[in-house]
Image (cartoon, rainbow, N blue to C red):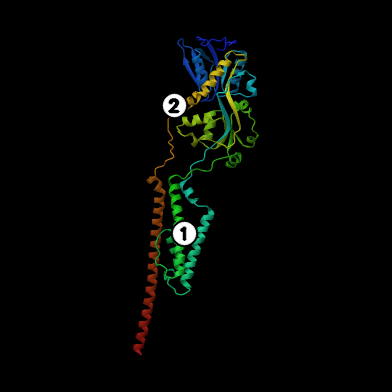
Amino acid sequence: MAIDFFPNKLPKRFMGCVLNIGAMGLTPDMIKESYTSENGENKFAANGLTLELINLFVKEMKMTPYFQEPIDGTENDRVFTLIGMLMTGEIDILTGEIPLIHPALSLGEPSAPMFISTLKFLVPCPKPLMKTEKMLHLFTLSSWISMGLVFTFVSVLFWILSNYPIRRNDFTAFSLLAQCFSGAWAVLLGNSVPQMPLSLGTRTLFIIYVWYCFAITTVFQAFFTTYLVEPGFEARLKNLDDVRRAGLKYVFFPTTEAYQKLVDIDEVDAFEKEYFSDILEGYSSVMFKRNTFMTSQEHYPSYLARLSGFDDEGNVVCYLDESIVTWPIGALLTKGHPLLQIINLHITRCIEGGLLEAYWTKLKHETNLKANTTEKNSEYVVFCLMHLFPMFILLSFGYILSTFSFLCELILFRMKSKRIGSLKFKELRIFAELRILDENK
């Protein structure tokens, strides 16, 4: 059996020893809690993604946690206060949204990374398309033009074959150009024509046009039904050029200016800035009002979407394709702290066991349950009468228009009949007068 010549002198259990903890950050990385002790003193506690493993460590080692008042956010003055307490030894550990990069490593002893955080540009998600807008773009412009040209060409060719036959005129129903266009339109809509052609040339043209219309209408009906139920979404923003074309403003928080300067992004200087004092309002302007964009890590937008009742945060949380920076998130201990090695071992084992991922999944589910409203989202859409409502409106408009056209036709026919009748009456009267004159002679 191997002998450890340098055994760890720290006890395995600390029997209630106090561990002073400082915490800062946004929900859900740091969730602030407060309570009143038995002697009436206000005390604080904290939980969240950056505190879960520390709380498990304190519980496992049977220590007593003592939290300084957690900072719910990243206010400069209070952050510097906690950093000063860490450097003077007033607190043993500082945790929260602390990137383990060079400026932070000079303040204390870094722990093992708890998770990897990626800073990205948070942008508005694509809005659902209007059903009518999607239907108009069912085919490309070139396809619509080609169909119009085919329709016109076939109508004119029918008229030529009817009026200038090669052998005999057997297609008298299309002697007028208007009749040719009406018949070609009827075939395109799947209706019958007033007369079938008899000659080989007209029959060949007719059957080719019928096959063409059958293929076009089959594709049209398939896409039409799909887009009628689920028209889809607008094109998403992929890069800063798309953001610039969309005319979005850049969200800036004056209280976190020092924190934001850790990552110098020159590209945002070209955008107009919109200042927010409240972090929640800034995120809401991007996710729900859709008129700004900002830099953000991934946890808070996802948590805010769940808090707003979205089961799938992908409907309101969207990022540009390219990431800004990726860094590990951990905790800082005072220089030379004896618990550093034990805490690192504990964090590593918890990460390998998936405890932090399980906590994040549980937290998102609990947040959804606490939400006041629930935004239902499903990839399955039931086809119902609601989806046909626009088509019924279009059908009603067609009936009204056709009725109006029919009435106009009746009125014109009646006026024409009266005119013809009056002319015939005048002819008969003249004929009668001439006959009377002949008889008198």
193 to the left or right of 30 = left
Count residues near mark 1 (Cα–Cα under 10 Å), then give few for <14, some for 14-19, many for 20+.
some
Asked whether disc 2 touches disc 1, contact meaning CB atoms under 8 Å apart, the reply is no
For the residue marked with disc 1, what is the amino acid?
Answer: Tyr
Question: Residue 83 occupies which quadrant of the picture?
Answer: top right
Give how far across and how far down residue 268 sits, in percent. 63, 35
Question: Residue 183 occupies which quadrant of the picture?
Answer: bottom left
The residue that mark 2 highlights is 366
Return the residue nearer the eye: 134 or 58: 58
Mark before the other along the chain sequence, 2 or 1 = 1
Return the residue nearer the eye: 118 or 392: 118
The kind of secondary structure element at disc 1 is helix
Question: Residue 436 occupies which quadrant of the picture?
Answer: bottom left
Q: Which mark is residue 212?
A: 1
Give how far across and how far down residue 238 sits, in percent. 57, 40
Looking at the image, is 24 positioned above or below residue 238?
Answer: above
The kind of secondary structure element at disc 2 is helix
Spatial CA distance of label 2 from label 1 is 56 Å
Quadrant placement of the C terminus: bottom left
| Residue 434 appears in the picture as rendered | yes
For the residue marked with disc 2, what is the amino acid?
Answer: Glu
Quadrant placement of the N terminus: top right
Q: Nearer the viewer, mark 2 or mark 1?
A: 1
49 to the left or right of 424 = right
